[in-house]
Image (cartoon, rainbow, N blue to C red):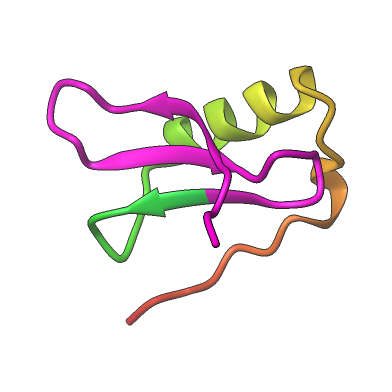
Amino acid sequence: MGCESDNLQLDRESYQYAFVSGPSTKYLWLLSRTPSVEMEIIEKFIEMSKLRGFDTDNLIFVQHN
């Protein structure tokens, strides 16, 4: 059994983050190597997600300590 996902964006310079989605607009993740992400990256993630048809109004951002 496989898992389908699409890499929407990858930080190719330092590999610190990736924007990943499922095969539909039902699943969406911002993966980071660090507990916090710069606001500029979050804004880029939201904008790219909107352009691809994701509902960004209900995104959940988890606070990591």
> Does 20 lie within the magenta span?
yes
Residue plotted at (52% across, 41% down): 20
- State which quarter of the image contains the C terminus: bottom left
Is 8 displayed left or right of 38 in the figure? right
46 over 31 or under it: above or below: above
How many marks the image carries: the answer is 0
Question: What percent of the width, then of the height, locates residue 48?
Answer: 64, 22
Q: Nearer the viewer, residue 5 or 13?
A: 5
What's the magenta region?
1-29
Q: Is residue 16 left or right of residue 8?
A: left
Relative depth, front residue between 1 and 53: 1
Q: Is 18 or 23 nearer to us in this picture?
A: 23
| Residue at 67 percent of width and 24 percent of height | 47
Residue drawn at 83 percent across, 56 percent down: 58
**Which residue is drawn at the image coordinates 22% and 42% (left, top)?**
16
Relative side of 8 to 36, left or right: right
Q: In the rendered view of the protein, which quadrant contains the N terminus?
A: bottom right
Between 35 and 22, the one lying in front of the other is 22
